[in-house]
Image (cartoon, grey):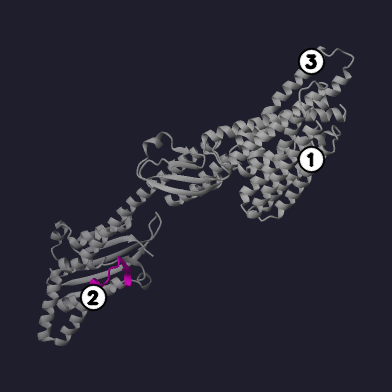
């Protein structure tokens, strides 16, 4: 196929595809207008559709008329109308930019653009009426230089636009300027790339308007189909030019309706149909990744599921989901709303959306439930099926994570309450023990001090000081643990008072190595054992007895270190009674505290030997 024929084929395909795309665009805009509130963007898109459709249909009619040898299918006025429609398309570009920019200079630039388009249109119709010919070369030259000037002006006017967007606007206008320059030169069919740019310059203008002002509204409904259709036309053109035409040229010796020739055309049609799904996927990739820069929703869902698992609080999960959805859907703002119940109308439809807002319910099992509200969706954003599926999946992911956190929090709170109750019980027991210093001991100590005041005043004063230190040590500290050294000091103060009472009948031996005195032990763990030994052993023996206090470290086979505190008394006492008498408040208190602090590894053991004496051993792991 020679270059002129290829150019003619390109024009035929271009006008046909262009008419189909602009017709599709008009249907989409009308459907959108019925669904939502009309605005200036909708009006601009309708104008773009009407102008583009008029230009492509008019050129298609003119092209067919030339091919049929001029049978009166058109008139100069149709040509003038067609070229006038083409001349107004760059004005729509400027108008769209002025809408986004909003500056006074852009406002006047729009008026100038409309003035140029009106002037060019009047020239076209003047030439059609006076000379019975269109288009007007003067009009096309006016549009050429006007589009170039407006492109330069838009680059320097202080619109509220980024440099990238300004370049897009200017590029569309420069393409149009080149198209007008070519059309003004009346060089038809010279080269198919030139023909493609010259006659189809309206398509880049329409795509730029969509991209800048209504990126999301027609992305899936129009852009993907538009690009798919253009790619399909290019594939069909390429198959014909590079496959069908050469093969048919070698097949010229046969008849036109030869079976092989028909079979070749049918095969290429089938190949084109099979290629369309791949072309549509490629078009979808171009729109989603290059034009809209849309998130990969499967990856977004996977990342959200992984990231919300790292958050350990409900507010953190909700904040992360809200911000992720706001960024993914290009929302102007995102708000979080708390509700005690899910309204009836939202139980069946947790996701509700309008042309500008999205309401997503997080359906947690228990109250409160949450709702994320996304507003001011950018660029005429509309939710498509993959986006609604992503939102529904994210709402369920967030709800399940919040439910899991609530269950964990409830379990932790229950464990904390149980631990706190155990701690308070231990504190109460400790306070009770401190308040249960044997009243008999206190009364006996005061009686002894009274007796010593009469017989030995100095010793009475010293005993009174010992009692004061003992009471201060017992009553002033609220700690549950102390060092073994502090416990031994307290016991020594207690025994000094008892020595004043029993004198030589009480013999005391304390064997606690210095390296063990730094160990942490429960407070008042020895005092009840020592008091029990004196009360039931030493005091009930007329000859008194020996009291031995010792500490040693043992290492059992199951590992760890066990501290053993021993209190032995050799007083004869009523050993049979001691073996059958139930444990008193002090010993019961010690057992309970050891069990609360250390569990089954701690124990209080009391062994009675009628000949030797009584041994009480408190065993528990070392607390550093």
Q: Position of residue 181 (x, y in %)?
A: 81, 41
Observer-nearest residue: 270 or 382? Answer: 382
* Alpha-carbon span between mark 2 and mark 1: 109 Å
Q: Earlier in the sequence, mark 3 or mark 2?
A: 3
Q: Viewed as shown, does residue 617 lie left or right of 88? A: left
Observer-nearest residue: 219 or 558? Answer: 219
Q: Which mark is residue 303?
A: none
Viewer-nearest of labels 2 and 1? 1
Secondary structure of the residue carrying numbered label 2? helix
Q: Position of residue 384 (x, y in %)?
A: 55, 36
Q: What span is colored magenta in the figure?
A: 473-485
Q: Earlier in the sequence, mark 2 or mark 1?
A: 1
Magenta-colored stretch includes residue 604: no
Instruction: From the image, tell me which residue sits under label 1.
Output: 140
Instruction: From the image, tell me which residue sits under label 3.
Output: 262
Viewer-nearest of labels 3 and 2? 3
Residue at x 31%, y 58% (from the top left corner)? 597
Q: Which mark is residue 472?
A: 2
Q: Viewed as shown, does residue 63 lie left or right of 435? A: right
Marks 1 and 3 in Cβ contact (< 8 Å): no
Q: Viewed as shown, does residue 154 lie left or right of 338? A: right
Residue furthest right as drawn = 253
Q: Earlier in the sequence, mark 1 or mark 3?
A: 1
């Amino acid at each position: 196929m020679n270059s002129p024929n290829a150019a003619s084929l390109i024009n035929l395909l271009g006008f046909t595809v262009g008419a189909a795309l602009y017709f599709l665009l008009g249907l989409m805009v009308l459907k959108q207008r019925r669904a939502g509130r009309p605005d200036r963007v909708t009006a601009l898109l309708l104008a773009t559709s009407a102008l583009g459709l008029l230009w492509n249909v008019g050129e298609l009619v003119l092209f067919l008329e030339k091919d049929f040898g001029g049978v009166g299918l058109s008139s100069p006025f149709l040509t003038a109308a067609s070229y006038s429609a083409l001349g107004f398309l760059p004005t729509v570009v400027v108008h769209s930019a002025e809408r986004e920019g909003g500056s006074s200079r852009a406002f006047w630039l729009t008026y100038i653009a409309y003035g140029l388009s009106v002037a060019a249109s009047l020239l076209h119709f003047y030439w059609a009426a006076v000379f019975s010919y269109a288009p007007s070369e003067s009009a096309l030259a006016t549009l050429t230089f006007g589009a170039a000037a407006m492109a330069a002006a838009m680059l320097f006017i202080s619109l509220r636009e980024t440099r990238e967007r300004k370049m897009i606007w200017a590029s569309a206008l420069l393409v149009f300027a080149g198209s007008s320059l070519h059309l003004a030169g009346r060089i038809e069919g010279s080269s198919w790339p030139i023909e493609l740019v010259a006659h189809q310059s309206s398509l880049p203008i329409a795509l730029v308007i969509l991209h800048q002002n209504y990126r999301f509204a027609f992305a899936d409904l129009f852009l993907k189909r538009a690009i798919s259709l253009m790619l399909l036309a290019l594939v069909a053109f390429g198959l014909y030019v590079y496959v069908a035409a050469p093969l048919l040229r070698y097949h010229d010796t046969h008849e036109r309706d030869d079976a092989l020739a028909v079979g070749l055309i049918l095969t290429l049609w089938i190949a084109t149909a099979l290629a369309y799904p791949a072309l549509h996927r490629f078009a979808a990739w171009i729109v989603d990744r290059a034009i809209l820069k849309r998130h990969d929703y499967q990856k977004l869902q996977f990342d959200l599921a992984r990231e919300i698992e790292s958050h350990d609080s409900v507010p953190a999960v909700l904040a992360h989901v809200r911000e992720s959805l706001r960024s993914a859907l290009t929302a102007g703002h995102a708000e979080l709303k708390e509700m005690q119940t899910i309204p009836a109308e939202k139980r069946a439809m947790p996701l509700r959306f309008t042309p500008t807002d999205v309401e997503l319910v997080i359906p947690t099992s228990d109250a409160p439930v949450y709702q994320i509200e996304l507003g001011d969706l950018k660029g005429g954003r509309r939710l498509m099926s993959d986006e609604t599926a992503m939102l529904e999946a994210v709402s369920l992911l967030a709800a399940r994570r919040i439910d899991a956190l609530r269950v964990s929090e409830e379990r932790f709170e229950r464990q904390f309450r149980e631990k706190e109750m155990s701690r308070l019980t231990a504190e109460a027991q400790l306070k009770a023990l401190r308040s249960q210093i044997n009243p008999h001991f206190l009364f006996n100590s005061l009686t002894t001090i009274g007796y010593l005041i009469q017989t030995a005043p100095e010793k009475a004063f010293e005993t009174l000081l010992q009692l004061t230190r003992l009471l201060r040590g017992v009553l002033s500290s609220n700690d549950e643990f102390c060092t073994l050294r502090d416990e031994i000091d307290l016991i020594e103060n207690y025994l000094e008072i008892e020595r004043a009472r029993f004198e030589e009948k009480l013999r005391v031996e304390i064997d606690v190595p210095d390296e063990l005195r730094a160990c942490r032990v429960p407070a008042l763990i020895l005092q009840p054992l020592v008091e029990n030994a004196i009360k039931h052993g030493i005091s009930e023996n007329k000859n008194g007895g020996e009291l031995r206090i010792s500490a040693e470290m043992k290492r059992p086979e199951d590992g760890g270190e066990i501290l053993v505190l021993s209190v032995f008394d050799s007083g004869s006492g009523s050993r049979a009674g001691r073996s059958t008498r139930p444990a008193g408040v002090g010993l019961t208190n010690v057992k309970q505290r050891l069990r609360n602090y250390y569990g089954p590894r701690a124990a209080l053991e009391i062994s009675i030997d009628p000949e030797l004496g009584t041994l009480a051993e408190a065993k528990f792991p070392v607390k550093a």
